[in-house]
Image (spheres, rainbow, N blue to C red):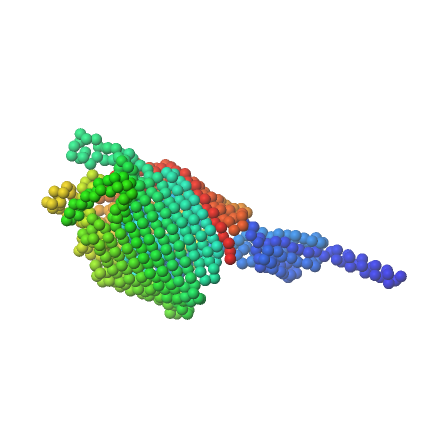
Amino acid sequence: MHKFVFILLLQTVCLSVFSQKATLSGKVFNKNTNEVIDFAYVYLDSIYTSTTTNESGIYSFSNLTAEKYKLCVSVLGYEKFSQKINLKPGINTINIPLEAKSFELSPIVITGTGTHHRIDKVPVQTEIITKKDIADLSGRNIEEIISGISSSIDYTTSSMGTNIKINGLGKDYVLILVNGKRLTGDIGGYADLSRINAADIEQIEVVKGASSTLYGSDAIAGVINIITKKTKGKIVASSSTRLGGYNDFKQLNTFHFSSKKISGKTSFNYKQKDGYQLNSMQFNNKWESNHDLPFLVPTFYKSVNKTKAYTISQSLDYEVNKKLSFDVNLSWYEKTLFFPFRAQMHNYYYNDRATSIGGKYKLKNKNYLSFSVDFDNYLYYTEYPYKYNETYITDKDIIKKTYYPGDRFKNSDQIHMISQVKGVFNLNDKNKLSVGTEVKGEFLEAKYRLTRPTVEAYTYSLYAQDEMKINEKYSLVAGVRSLYHDKSGFIVTPKLTLMYTEQNFTHRFTYSNGFKSPTLKELYYYYESDRMGMYRLYLGNEDLKPQKSHYLAISTEFKRDKLRTGVSLYLNRIYDKIDYTIIPTTYDQRRRGIEEAKKRYNIDNARTIGLDCHFSYPLFSQLMINGNYSYVNARNMTQDVRLNGISEHSATCKFSWNKKWETNTLNVSLSGVYKSDQFYLEEDLKRSYTDSYQLWKLSSRLSTTKWRNYTINLSGGIDNLFDYVDNKPYGSHYGTLNPGRTLFLELNIDFTKNK
């Protein structure tokens, strides 16, 4: 009997004790995306009991006393979680949302030194346009995006392409790279940037001033490096569609794949837009001699013509082993420029074929050797949709031909071949040495447009650069390139950059030389053309000297908390600048109807001097403001006039508002661009000016990751919010070719599968 009472009493006590025990479990997840977080450290602070979440983000504690605790979670990349809880007997479930930390790791750039640096620690001053900047702006093309963010960059477009300008110097002095390789192939020296879709850009890096030490000829005003998206370790398929006013349609489809040894990217890029007139009238060139004639006459020409273009590209990367890797890049590009029938009875057709092969061999201590061989063939045709009788005039003969619908005439055939070998060596903790060699060959065939059927030029160069970490505050980059151009001779271009950092300030001083050899067209051109109502002869000059420059710049940047601001002063002196000069016409030329003859020559002296300022600051947690201002005084010192097409004052600003909730992100941006008037010295030596203008854009973007493996971005907005149009008569110089207020809509879908 006593045993029975004892057992009953013992069971009662045990049940009472166990009834006070508690269990705790739950899921740890990302507050914004709902993604589970594995290997998070979860602990009860008061009793020092801990565990970690599993692959499903689940944590659990058992055999706890039902009382008050302090529940804590810690994991890299997220804000620490801490909450007081009161456990009840039995099962308790508490799910824990974590806020991701907003790490401000500055992006990596490579263009300034040819080696990788964080943007805030790179010795050579570099501007960066990030993927987010590009998405916020939702620009119609690359030129609009770059000039809409960096006030020191401007552009004008024509049927020949884009004239990009940096700090007062235009297309002849700006080197454009795509993934570190020259964008070769142009028409009349204008870069053809329509080969690249903005939706495929990872970031854009801009280095201002002479950069011939690293990049050779053409880099007198600066370098723009467009870096496209490239994904490793994943399977990614993406589609981007943009539709704007005047049937401005863009489609980009890409597919990335990778395995243990090989990865690649396939892309298809299509663009089209309708042309438009800014004014249906043009100046009557005969009015000067007869004022009884109308001052303006109708025209069918359009300021912007209809175009269609597509690019197909393929890249492959193969990793032989941990040390050796190879890459191959192929692309095919076609573009047709359509003219109105009543204005011009033929169109233009462009075709570019590019191939690149490269490799990299890793050595000890992060040293490496790399090589590349690039081949680019750019062709420019006149295309005849109707029967047409054409006349060609050379320095020796007059040739007449009849073309039928579907015929093409090859105006020019350009070939560029570039081979490079480069080595990067970490000599010690304070010195990184880059050495390399480059051989470049240029070939041009332009029937009826040159003094001889085909011409060619070769450049051979060697360069070396040392990046020296003097101490914690001082860094020095010193380099020199020596090159031989078979038409211009031997040139040496040094560069020196000193960076000093102290607390929140970074100071940089740069001196460098620039170099540009005469182009084959500048040397051998012979072309007669009826432009703007006057029959002119354009001649090259085989006695042209290379253009050289001396560049000086000093800059200061300030960084504190979330405020970023900076100012830079620069001087760029250009010697033997190449331009056209009017020469007397000969008796035979006048008999053929030539009214004016122009020949390439070297201007003795030109210079640009200016100031760049920038700042960014969050007005509050969700609203960011960015601003840029540039002043440039660009002059032809020999004639004491401003250089053509340059705005002395430029400014950009952007207000960007972001809101996150669950798996969605909303961005609303208001951006503006201001340009002061531009000066032009006409071919008849008259002076003209464009109007100053400002353009504003309102855009919004909604991004969601609600569906697994998919990211969807929907953008829309208003271009030219206040409907500004520079509608002077056709043939005038325009500040902008913007057609007025238009709407746009863009949809981007990305599918990602981690391997």
- 168 lies above or below 721: below
> Going 54% across and 55% down the picture, which residue do you hit?
78
The residue sitting at the left extreme is: 587
In the rendered image, the quadrant that contains the N terminus is bottom right
Q: Describe residue 375's horizontal placement relative to residue 564 as left or right.
A: left
Picture coordinates of residue 423 (x, y %)? Answer: 35, 66
The residue sitting at the right extreme is: 1
Q: Nearer the viewer, residue 194 or 222?
A: 194
Q: Describe residue 256's horizontal placement relative to residue 628 as left or right.
A: right
Q: Quadrant of residue 74?
A: bottom right
Q: Quadrant of residue 3?
A: bottom right
> Going 38% across and 41% down the picture, which residue do you hit?
248
Picture coordinates of residue 657 (x, y %)? Answer: 46, 45
**Number of callouts:** 0
Picture coordinates of residue 663 (x, y %)? Answer: 53, 47
> Going 47% across and 44% down the picture, which residue do you hit?
714
The residue sitting at the top extreme is: 292
Q: Nearer the viewer, residue 255 or 474?
A: 255
> Going 27% across and 63% down the picture, which residue do you hit?
461
Q: Quadrant of residue 387?
A: top left
Picture coordinates of residue 159 (x, y %)? Answer: 29, 44
- 458 lies above or below 696: below
- Is residue 723 something one can see in this rendering? yes
- 59 lies above or below 411: below
- Is residue 476 something one can see in this rendering? no
